[in-house]
Image: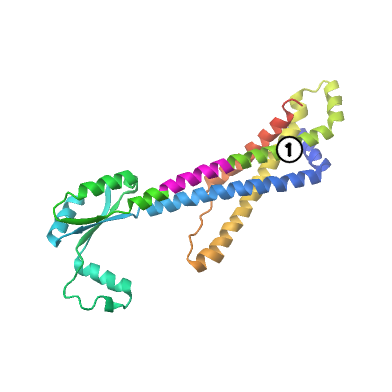
Amino acid sequence: MIGYFFKKTWQNIRHSFWHNIICLVATTLSLSIFGFFLLLIFNLSIFLKTWQGNIPIIVFFKNEKAALEAKSQLEKRKELKKVEYVSSEQALKRLEKWLKGKFSLLEGLKENPLFPSLEITFSPFYQTPSFLENFKKNIKNFPGVKEVACPSYIFSLLVTTWRIFKILIFLASIFLSISTIFIISTLIRFNFQQRREEIEIMRLLGANEWFIKCPFYLEGLIQGFFASVISLFILRIGVSWYNLKIAMFQNGFNFSFFDLQRILGFIGCGFILGGFGSFLSLYKS
């Protein structure tokens, strides 16, 4: 029985070979764009998590004693990943290194103008704009605190931008999914109409609807499967080319490709879209 269904499916594909090729190309293009958007979300989430775990709050103190006392207290807090003390001398050396030989800017200074500080990094779970703001307010009450530098607004802006971007990609993905379903359903409907006479004879002979339509359902599933696999292949080549030609030589961000779980999920998505397209085209045929 299964062999018969696959045989009939292959006959349908051969009978409308070029229509199937055109449909496969269009579906592959649609799924490739869809996959590209998913890759953007995937890599942006990786970038955000990486950057999120390295956002420091820098607390400047009036003197070394106050800084070291605060350090001993803060190191006991579980939400802090790292508390690093930077003396005035270390801060000056960093500044000199950053200026790269432009020491004329520092000449004439009779004493070190920089203050000792603590560079505080949080565990990723606590890296939220609201938590950073609350921590900033609380640490200002520590004795000897002169100033607190907290880039929470940058993180908040990045998170907001990422969320808006996710919504836009989600809307685009819905549109591309609908277009994929439409393309496949149009092909299946065309192939079904092409074999209308043969199908009517089968109905007269007593064949049930499931037996008649199963090869067409399989055709839609095959279209979705191969389109998703080819799309992944195209995306993999694109990611490799970008990482090799652009990221390596221009110090850009390296794109990561989907892991096995997401690859299987993408193929499953193509499978489902193909099956749903077939179902819509044959629902009342």
Which residue is painted at 24% across and 70% down in the image? 92
> In x, y percent, where is residue 132?
29, 48
- Quadrant where the image shows the N terminus: top right
Q: Is residue 61 left or right of residue 122?
A: left
> In x, y percent, where is residue 145?
17, 55
Question: Is any atom of residue 122 visible in this view?
Answer: yes
Q: Is residue 251 magenta?
A: no
Q: Is residue 168 or residue 38 the one in the foreground?
A: 168
- Magenta residues? 159-172
The answer to whether residue 162 is above or below residue 184 is below
Which residue is painted at 30% across and 44% down in the image? 131
The answer to whether residue 257 is above or below residue 89 is above
- Quadrant where the image shows the C terminus: top right
> In x, y percent, where is residue 182?
69, 37
Question: Is any atom of residue 6 visible in this view?
Answer: no
- The amino acid beneath tag 1 is Glu
Residue that numbered label 1 is attached to: 219
Q: Is residue 14 or residue 235 the one in the foreground?
A: 235
Q: Main secondary structure of the magenta part?
A: helix
Q: Is residue 95 left or right of residue 202?
A: left
> In x, y percent, where is residue 263?
56, 46
The answer to whether residue 113 is above or below residue 159 is below
Q: Is residue 222 left or right of residue 132?
A: right
User: Does dot 1 land on a helix, a strand or a loop?
Assistant: helix
Q: Is residue 207 or residue 246 the one in the foreground?
A: 246
Which residue is painted at 29% across and 53% down in the image? 150
Q: Is residue 205 or residue 32 the one in the foreground?
A: 32
